Image: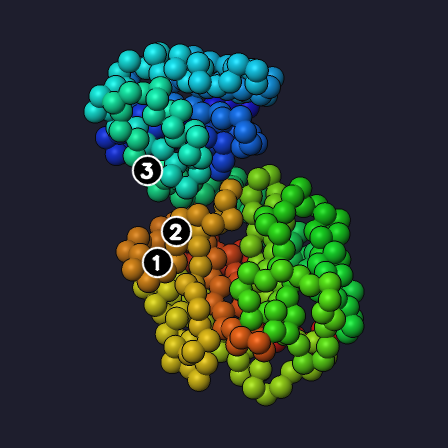
Amino acid sequence: MTVNLAPLYAVLKRTGLNAVAVVPGANFLRVFGKDFHQMERPLVVIVPQDGEPVAVVPHLEMGSFTPLGFVGKVFTWRDEEGFRDAFLAAGAALPQLRVGARVGVEGQRMRVFDYLALQEALPGAVLIDAHGEISAIRLHKTAGEIAKLRTAIQLSEAALEATLAEVKIGMSETEIEQVLLRQLFAHGADGLSFEPIVAAGDNAARPHAKARSTYRIKPGDALLFDFGGRHGGYSADITRTFFVGQVSDHDRAFYDTVLAANAKGRAVARPGISAGDLDDAVLKILEHSQFAAFARHKTGHGLGLDIHEAPQIMRGNGQFLEPGMVFTIEPGLYRDGEAGVRIEDNVVVTETGIECLTTFPRELRIVG
């Protein structure tokens, strides 16, 4: 494994920050090639614009941290000692980060006690939420990253097809979820992108539903899967909605509206369009339909080491799409107490348009 601090130095140059501090998570993994558990033991790496990087590492993790080849000062601590002295020693090794120094931190990742320890170690420094600027190191995927995403998506789609072959009327949502989990690992997933959503009937109208052991699928139910397997640290995020046994004309029109919005997003997405304009084009399909009242969320989000990352495909986001960006296109409609439909694809921006990494059919399908 090789540590590559160059992306963080680029952030410092671009932002004018005096230093950045990163903690375990997707950005850490991108730079160090390895992630660590975030539990009660803080692990923080501080990279200054000038001077040697510094790391505060629990003694428990030194066996994993040392092989990374970190070139800088490491301050370690044992559980019985506590981490305060290690942070103070790290701060003393960074005298340039004192009164007025601006230190960027990952506001959506750093815990409060990490923040307070860092603040005490760097008296007078100003800690700034630079989550977006730091996370931008992952915005443009390399060919290798896209290959891992492609594998994660392919194995997830194969697992879904195998799961559908086992779906029968009368099964519970949790029984179907267990089949999906088994199939994901059988098809080569090395982890889960997130806890899968398997939701039928009225539960499908809840965008973040939990599978129920008490509900058994019946004819006419919508059956929604939102899930993904991981490969090499990269996540698939796929949603497909089916109907059990039969579908009413009303639900077919409901489904076809979402399908049209999804198709619009895939047709419009290209380099140079803003994320906000893409979202607007997709949402207008829903808003100009008879089902406008049932639209609830933006079109999509970035995808990679994190299941939700930049770019956010939402109105008001003026960020322009560029080659190498990967994101979801996932319009949905949700009728409370009745049914929900979401169709989600994963796409990568190319020089001339997009490539849809998901290939699972989108046309309405009856299962069970």
Q: Is the residue marked by circle 2 packed among few (<14), some (14-19), or many (20+) residues within 10 Å?
A: many
Circle 1 — which element? Answer: helix
Position of 360 compared to 285: left or right?
right
> Upstream in the sequence, badge 2 or badge 1?
1
**Cα separation between marks 1 and 3:** 23 Å
Label 1 Cα crowd, 10 Å radius (few <14 / some 14-19 / many 20+): many
Q: How many numbered discs, if any?
A: 3
- Quick one: quadrant of the N terminus? top right
The x and y percentages for residue 286 are 42, 76
* Name of the residue lying farthest toward the left: 100
Amino acid identity at mark 2: Pro
Q: What element carries label 3?
A: strand
> Would residue 339 be found to the left or right of residue 258 on screen?
right
Q: Residue at x 44, y 25 (%)?
A: 44
Circle 3 packing at 10 Å, graded few (<14), some (14-19), many (20+), is some
Q: Let me know if residue 151 appears in the view.
A: no
Q: Which mark is residue 129?
A: 3
**Residue at position x 66%, y 51% in the image:** 155
Give the residue pinned by disc 1: 275
Residue at which label 2 appears: 311
Viewer-side residue, 64 vs 124: 124
Type of the residue with mark 1: Ala
In the displayed structure, would residue 70 be above or below residue 12? Answer: above
Distance Cα–Cα, label 2 vs label 1:
7 Å
Give the residue type that dot 3 points to.
Answer: Asp
Residue at position x 34%, y 28% in the image: 20
Relative to 368, is 76 above or below? above
* Label pair 2/1, CB-CB below 8 angstroms: yes
